[in-house]
């Protein structure tokens, strides 16, 4: 007798369901309903369940009912560190890798203006870092005292100099504080997994209540992680494989959305050309970047300002005044779905622009620098030119008539020879929006999750 799983994503716009036959590693059915988080999340969930039931005739008994969420703006985080290029960057990577949306990054000693800005941003979690173990502790203690005396009532994570733990704990005596390992225990040494785990634990144990998602707890067994983390876990499984099943190898996933464009890479990113030296912090093999200014709805105006009207005219074949009018409408109506040929053309232009810029920011770059011994080629970030697979996910890609053309614009170009974007990867399309489901399923049945992902992605057209 077959066993089944229900994978749920409480999104910002829709609650999406995927029913999976575990034995056959196939999609049994899909449905969605509005994400009614601001009122009663059960309303949208019930609509999605009824739609799924109608399409299947009846709902099977589910062995697993697992959920992820990016509802109500996702997991909003602020990171605070000491040096921008070091502990601040390490804290940023920990937050993004845990599926958070960074709404503020602060370096060095917090002042009153910084504190006011942090309060106004109203974060879900604050990650405080700073100093290597045994190094500078004055700044992080100062920042802890400032935060501890503030009116902020969100959870805090301390992942800084272990020598300052006692003072930091005292400063947060009346706050919700989780202490974990230093994100940078030694100079240029990253240790971000413990902080990622702490962020995800807080998300599961506390944030779901604040978002109102626990109101639907009767419909699922576990809310495992933020949706971006689920996508990343799915990408990791596809890249690495499972037991005797060989994965696809190093890969990229790009996901354009209404509020952000996310890029995930599962790759070392080491220089692929002999003689190139790596510069800056070491790169983590599993990396996520979030471009908060490249949302196709909430930030459509920003995309226009970034590339200019002429670029969007060239891509969409719509005259400039009409584009400005349409983008103004989109920014005020982020839930709108393109219907007319002009709206579809503009959506495609916005998507290709967001995809290209987001990929360029995620990938590294090279430049010639001059040293005492002569010129050398230095690499910042990851070299992803040799990546084997590029996966496109998200609504605009899944529903595009020509998703391959959209993703082609993310590849390396002779116009920008210093950008280390992919050269000639295999391009796969996540038409079923299955990556989040595979990431959730990988936590309980990785074999079924892997087989499902490979079957759906490699056979998508």
Image (spheres, rainbow, N blue to C red):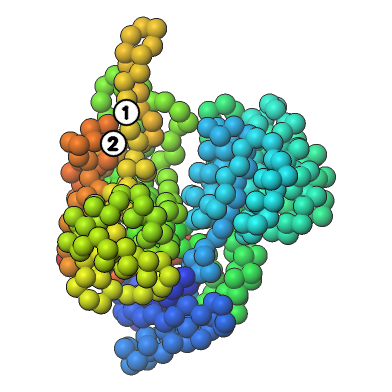
Tell me if residue 293 can be seen: yes
Q: Residues within 10 Å of mark 2 (few under 14, many from 20)?
A: many
- x 52%, y 55%: residue: 100
Tell me if residue 169 can be seen: no
* Residue 319 or residue 435, whichever sits in front: 319
Disc 1 to disc 2, how far (Cα)? 7 Å
Among all residues in the image, which is located at the extreme top?
A: 373
Q: Which residue is labeled 1 in the image?
A: 366
Instruction: Decide if residue 217 is on the left or right side of residue 169.
Output: left
| Quarter residue 214 falls in | bottom right
Instruction: Decide if residue 260 is on the left or right side of residue 314.
Output: right
Q: Are marks 1 and 2 in contact (CB under 8 Å)?
A: yes
Q: Residues within 10 Å of mark 1 (few under 14, many from 20)?
A: many
Q: Where is 337 relative to 103, above or below?
A: below
x%, y% of residue 218?
57, 82
x%, y% of residue 457?
25, 62
Location of the C terminus by quadrant is bottom left
x%, y% of residue 435?
35, 62
- x 32%, y 88%: residue: 56
Instruction: Decide if residue 41 is on the left or right side of residue 25.
Output: right
x%, y% of residue 306?
35, 49
* Residue 349 or residue 159, whichever sits in front: 349
Q: Which residue is labeled 2 in the image?
A: 420
Location of the N terminus by quadrant is bottom left
* Residue 92 or residue 243, whichever sits in front: 92
* Residue 241 or residue 353, whichever sits in front: 353
Instruction: Decide if residue 191 is on the left or right side of residue 451.
Output: right
Q: Where is 340 relative to 442, above or below?
A: below
């Amino acid at each position: 007798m077959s066993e089944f799983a229900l994978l749920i994503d409480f999104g910002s716009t829709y609650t999406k369901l995927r029913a999976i036959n575990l034995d056959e590693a196939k999609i049994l059915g899909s449905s969605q309903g509005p994400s009614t988080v601001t009122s009663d999340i059960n309303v949208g969930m019930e609509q999605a369940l009824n739609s799924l039931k109608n399409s299947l005739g009846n709902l099977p008994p589910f062995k697993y009912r697992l959920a992820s969420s990016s509802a109500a703006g996702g997991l909003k985080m602020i990171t605070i560190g000491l040096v921008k290029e070091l502990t601040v960057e390490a804290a940023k990577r920990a937050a993004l890798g845990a599926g958070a949306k960074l709404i503020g990054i602060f370096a060095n000693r917090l002042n009153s203006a910084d504190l006011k800005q942090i309060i106004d941003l109203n974060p879900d979690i604050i990650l405080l870092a700073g100093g290597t173990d045994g190094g500078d502790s004055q700044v992080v203690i100062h920042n802890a005292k400032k935060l501890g005396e503030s009116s902020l009532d969100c959870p805090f994570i301390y992942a800084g100099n272990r020598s300052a733990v006692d003072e930091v704990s005292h400063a947060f005596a009346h706050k919700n504080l989780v202490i974990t390992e230093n994100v940078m225990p030694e100079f240029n040494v990253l240790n971000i997994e413990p902080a990622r785990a702490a962020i995800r634990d807080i998300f599961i144990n506390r944030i779901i209540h604040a978002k109102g998602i626990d109101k639907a707890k009767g419909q699922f067994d576990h809310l495992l992680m933020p949706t971006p983390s689920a996508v990343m876990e799915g990408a990791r499984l596809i890249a690495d494989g499972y037991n005797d099943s060989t994965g696809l190898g190093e890969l990229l996933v790009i996901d354009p959305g209404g509020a952000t464009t996310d890029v995930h890479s599962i790759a070392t990113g080491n220089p692929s050309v002999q003689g190139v030296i790596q510069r800056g912090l070491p790169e983590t093999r599993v990396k996520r970047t979030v471009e908060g200014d490249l949302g196709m709805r909430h930030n459509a105006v920003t995309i226009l300002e970034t590339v200019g009207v002429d670029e969007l005219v060239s891509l969409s074949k719509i005259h400039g005044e009409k584009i400005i009018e349409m983008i103004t409408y989109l920014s005020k109506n982020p839930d709108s779905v393109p219907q007319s040929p002009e709206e579809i053309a503009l959506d495609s232009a916005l998507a290709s622009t967001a995809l290209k810029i987001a990929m360029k920011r995620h990938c590294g770059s090279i430049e010639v620098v001059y040293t005492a011994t002569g010129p050398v080629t230095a690499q910042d970030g990851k070299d992803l030119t040799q990546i084997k697979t590029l996966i496109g996910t998200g609504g605009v890609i899944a529903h595009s008539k020509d998703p391959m053309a959209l993703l082609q614009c993310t590849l390396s170009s002779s116009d920008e020879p210093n950008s280390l974007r992919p050269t000639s990867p295999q391009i796969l399309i996540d038409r079923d929006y299955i990556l989040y489901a595979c990431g959730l399923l990988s936590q309980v049945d990785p074999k079924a999750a892997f087989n499902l992902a490979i079957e759906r992605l490699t056979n998508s057209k």
